[in-house]
Amino acid sequence: MRDKTTQDRPVDLPTGFNAWLLDCAPAPGCVTCRTEWRSLKEAEEVGEIWQAAGHATKIRDHASGSH
């Protein structure tokens, strides 16, 4: 097997994918949601979209009683 000398091309995500992925709103009065929201915004600012998505998931999970 020969070594690969070039990188694969980056994956182009559909326009608006990150907006859909990060779509959430913190529950009013919930300290955990507010903390996750701040962490989401910080991760988004530095380009860590998958980390931001994890925070968005925790915010959306508020309704299920996970925190």
Image (cartoon, helix red, strand yellow):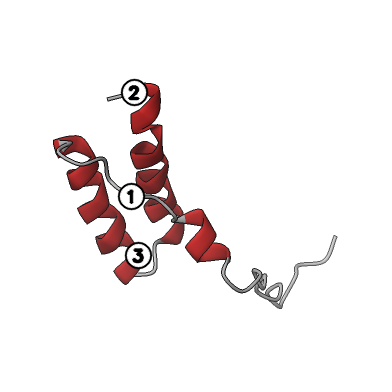
- Measured as percent of width and height from the top left, residue 40 is found at 30, 55
Camera-side residue: 48 or 8? 48
Camera-side residue: 5 or 45? 45
View extreme (right): residue: 1
Q: Earlier in the sequence, mark 3 or mark 1?
A: 1
Residue 3 picture quarter: bottom right
The reply, left or right, for residue 45 in relation to residue 47 is left
Query: Could you tell me which residue is drawn at 58 percent across and 64 percent down?
Result: 17
Secondary element at tag 3: helix
The C terminus, quarter of image: top left
Query: Counting other residues with Cα less than 10 Å from the Cα at mark 2, is it few (<14), some (14-19), or many (20 or more)?
Result: few
Residue annotated with mark 2 = 66
Residue annotated with mark 3 = 44
Q: Amino acid at mark 1?
A: Ala
Q: Amino acid at mark 2?
A: Ser
Q: Earlier in the sequence, mark 3 or mark 2?
A: 3
The reply, left or right, for residue 20 in relation to residue 32 is right
Query: Could you tell me which residue is drawn at 35 percent across and 46 percent down?
Result: 55
Q: Amino acid at mark 3?
A: Glu
- Measured as percent of width and height from the top left, residue 35 is found at 18, 45
